[in-house]
Image (cartoon, helix red, strand yellow):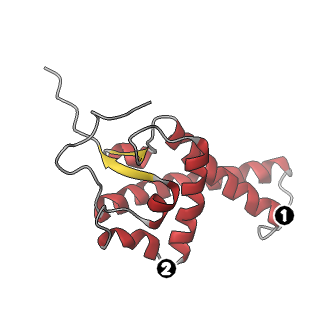
Amino acid sequence: MRLSGYFHSTHPHVGFWRRVASILYDLLLVVALLMVLTGLVFAARRGNAFDPQSLWFRLLLVTGWWTYFAWCWTHGGQTVGMRAWRLMLTRRDGTAVGLAAASLRFLCAGFSALAVGLGFAWILFDRDRLTWHDRLSGTELRLRSKLPKPQ
């Protein structure tokens, strides 16, 4: 499905600070989600302690984190933070993002962050304002036009 027509025509690519704001917004939601998952594990174990460093628990948290982003990106192209800042994720050709591209983007964003954030900061130097994970996953963030005010 082609998504053109939704984007701001004079400045389609998203700058650094708008991305940071969106990331911070989503970070609050992800932390809340991880806390809920932890609470569910604690409740399922009837209050018994467990090792938070265990592989199964780490995988559960990463899977929860991935699920949030993959679901949002494949069902409308926007997380809650992206919606608040009028950002939309598409493939480079303007079509909707599928599960494979969303998963690759999530994985590559992790590497972008682990490289002391250089993968994110790359947009300050990239002519198309793309991060490492944008380039590697074939996706891009676009600025959505403001909706007209109701009459």
In the figure, residue 52 lies in which quadrant?
bottom right
Residue at position x 40%, y 44% from top?
93
Give the farthest residue toward the left. Answer: 151
Q: Residue 62: image x %, image y %?
A: 67, 58
Residue 31 visible in the shown view: no
| Quadrant where the C terminus is found in the figure | top left
SS at mark 1?
loop
| Quadrant where the N terminus is found in the figure | top left
Q: Amino acid at mark 2?
A: Val
Distance of label 1 from label 2 (alpha carbons) = 31 Å
Residue 26 visible in the shown view: yes
For the residue pair 40 and 118, the one nearer the viewer reads as: 118
For the residue pair 148 and 112, the one nearer the viewer reads as: 112
- Residue that carries the numbered disc 1 in the rendered image: 50
Q: Nearer the viewer, mark 1 or mark 2?
A: 2
Residue at position x 41%, y 55% from top?
25
- Residue that carries the numbered disc 2 in the rendered image: 116
Bin the neighbour count of mark 2 within 10 Å (Cα to Cα): few under 14, some 14-19, many 20 and up: few
